Amino acid sequence: MLLDRFYPCAYLDSVFSIDYEKLYQLGYRGILFDIDNTLVLHGADSNPKVDALFRQIHRAGLKTLLLSNNSEERIQRFLAHIDAPYIAEAGKPSPANYFKALEMLGISREQAVVIGDQIFIDIYGANRCGIDSILVAFLRHENERHFGKRRVVEKWILRCWKLFPGRHRVLGDIVKKEKRS
């Protein structure tokens, strides 16, 4: 089906709702992250919560790489307190730098997962390469009402994805469980 190329393997509220230890148990060894509107608001620097998330991911045994269409200067500013390689001006959704990222991490496409907020960029690029993907709800300012036409089409594609669960490539139960005290 035409839309399959745009379907993620999973759709979650945020990068913080993912059980990274479970991803490791499922055989994943590396994560290719988008930055803007995935990890932080567009153009924002990392923050203590995101920095702690990367430490948690690395403790779980997963490698990380930032695959971004942003400039090198922007990515380096974001990485001030995070130890991760990156590819700037990646040209997503073109497959070339997705494959370069796998090579840099020393993992196969079956061991990788892409996490991003854009269907036509992050998810489509991952699907073109045969890499599993997790779409997260895009971050936006609290009072932000305007978003582009592409987001409207993405919303429609996501509705179709939800209507046909038999067409999903499923990662398993990767939603982080709340720990009870």
Image: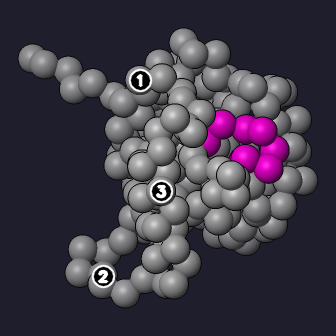
Identify the residue at horizontal 76%, vertical 63% (top origin): 92
First reached walking from the N terminus: tag 3 or tag 1: 3
* Label ID, residue 27: none
| Three-letter code, disc 3 | Cys
Nearest the viewer among 5 and 78 is 5
Q: Is residue 132 magenta?
A: yes
Q: Secondary structure at mark 1?
A: loop
Q: Residue furthest top?
A: 25
Mark 2 lies on residue? 144
Q: Residue at x 73, y 47 (%)?
A: 127
- Is tag 3's residue or tag 2's residue first in the polypeptide sequence? 2
The one nearer the camera, 166 or 70, is 166
Query: In terms of image quadrants, where is residue 121?
Result: bottom right
Q: Residues within 10 Å of mark 1 (few under 14, many from 20)?
A: few
Give the labeled residue for mark 3. Answer: 160
Q: Give the residue number, with chain letter if any, for mark 1.
A: 173
98 sits left or right of 24 in the view: right
The residue lying at 65 percent from left, 65 percent from top is: 120
The image position of residue 3, as x and y in percent, is 64, 57
- Amino acid type at mark 2: Glu
Which of the two discs, 3 and 2, sits closer to the camera?
3
Residue 122, quarter of picture? bottom right
Q: Which residues are magenta?
A: 126-133
CA distance for labels 3 and 1:
21 Å
